[in-house]
Image: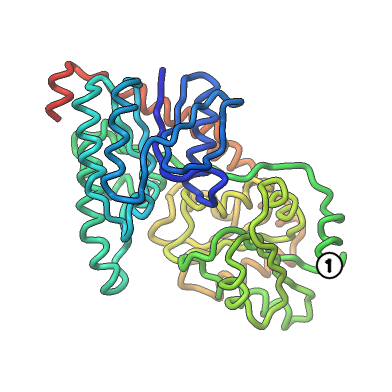
Amino acid sequence: MTYDLIFPALPPSLDGIGDYTAHLATELARTHEVRVLTAQADARDFREAGVTVERAFTTDRRAGVHDLVAPIAARRSDWVLLQYNPFSYGEWGLNLSLPVVLNRIRTAAPATRIALTVHEPFVPVRNLRSLVLTSWQRLQFWRLGRQADVVFCAIEPWVERFAPWFPTTPVVHLPVGSNMPRVEARRADTRKALGFGPDTLVLGLFGQGHPSRMLSFARRAVAGLRAEGRDAQVLYVGPAIDVVGTALSGVPHHCTGALPGPNVSRHLAAMDLYLAPFRDGVSARRGSFLAGLQHGLATVSTTGPQTDPFLDAQNGSAFLLAPDDDLSAFETHVLALVQDAALRVRIGAGGRALFDEVFAWPRIADRMLTALDAVPAPSSPLATAAR
């Protein structure tokens, strides 16, 4: 089978969906012919992994996505896999040329099927600005889904929500994975290099400083531990030094800045606990949360309307979840893990087992291929083109 993956950004750009695209392409290339079409001029070459990377379009102007049609029509791959976040294809998340491009691809390559992977459908309504943005983003998303043969959603609640939007199209849950490697590390050496003493309780944060990250929960939890006389400090790994530093004002913290993947892994190994509180709850699309599970860290996060039911079912065995509006419960979970070393070990092991079972890249690729194989081939070129 031949696959074309589409996303504007790829490594070395710091873009989570770009990393996802690169990892997924590499995994698919183990058994299939894979090409990635990107807008990034300095995208990393993946030839050693069997992946062809082409700069095939531009996002400098919204109509630049039309350049995708020619290379896809020439190759006529079995599947086009569009990775979607509205803000990746145009300012303010607006690019109504994108659904038109998918329709043109159907006409030019009628035997090629299209999969839409939804990493973010549209912004939720929280204020007047988001109300304006979401209006065109919802229309854009609906038009894209109507052109797809299958729609993949990064979290389970979206499957239930959007299946009625596309009644003749399979809507399938497909979680993301961790974009970090897991490398062997000497925990004591990393902690010493960072200036942490042997008795220091290191609580970890990792990722971007997105507003969905409830950094106030992390600060309050650490402040509470220090009020009890514990040497609790925060280790933050990521690029949002100013945002995180401001949010953690008043508690000791060390910010590393952006690091290469292997160094991220080594710094995660230096942590005692991992904190990942999210507004609206953690979900299967939160790569920073998954990195903690991947490294066997006892993790405290939050549950809310975006939390996948299968994650809620793992509460207490693979991590501890507090309601996203209950700071006291979050602090109680953190304290329980601090006080009980055996619980930390059990929760960390449970999280790593869950990661290996659900979120490892071979598992994600297999899940996607199973869903694609279940989609019937076009009955005729004319029927496909007329969709």
Numbered label tally = 1
Q: Residue at x 66, y 52 (%)?
A: 347
Residue 83 versus residue 70 in the image, above or below: below
Residue pointed to by mark 1? 195
- Helix, strand or loop at label 1? It is loop
Quadrant where the image shows the N terminus: top left
On screen, residue 342 versus residue 57, left or right, reads right
Quarter location, residue 80 = top left
Q: Which one is in front, 278 or 190?
A: 190
Image x and y of residue 291, in percent: 61, 50
Q: Which one is in front, 39 or 92?
A: 39
Quadrant where the image shows the C terminus: top left
Three-letter residue code for mark 1 = Gly
Image x and y of residue 245, in percent: 62, 74
Residue 152 versus residue 335 in the image, above or below: above
Quarter location, residue 270 = bottom right
Q: Judge whether residue 65 can be spotted in this image.
A: yes
Image x and y of residue 114, in percent: 30, 30
Q: What colour scheme does the image use?
A: rainbow
On screen, residue 317 versus residue 129, left or right, reads right
Residue 189 versus residue 333 in the image, above or below: above
Q: Residues within 10 Å of mark 1 (few under 14, many from 20)?
A: few
On screen, residue 117 versus residue 220, left or right, reads left
Image x and y of residue 55, in percent: 43, 36
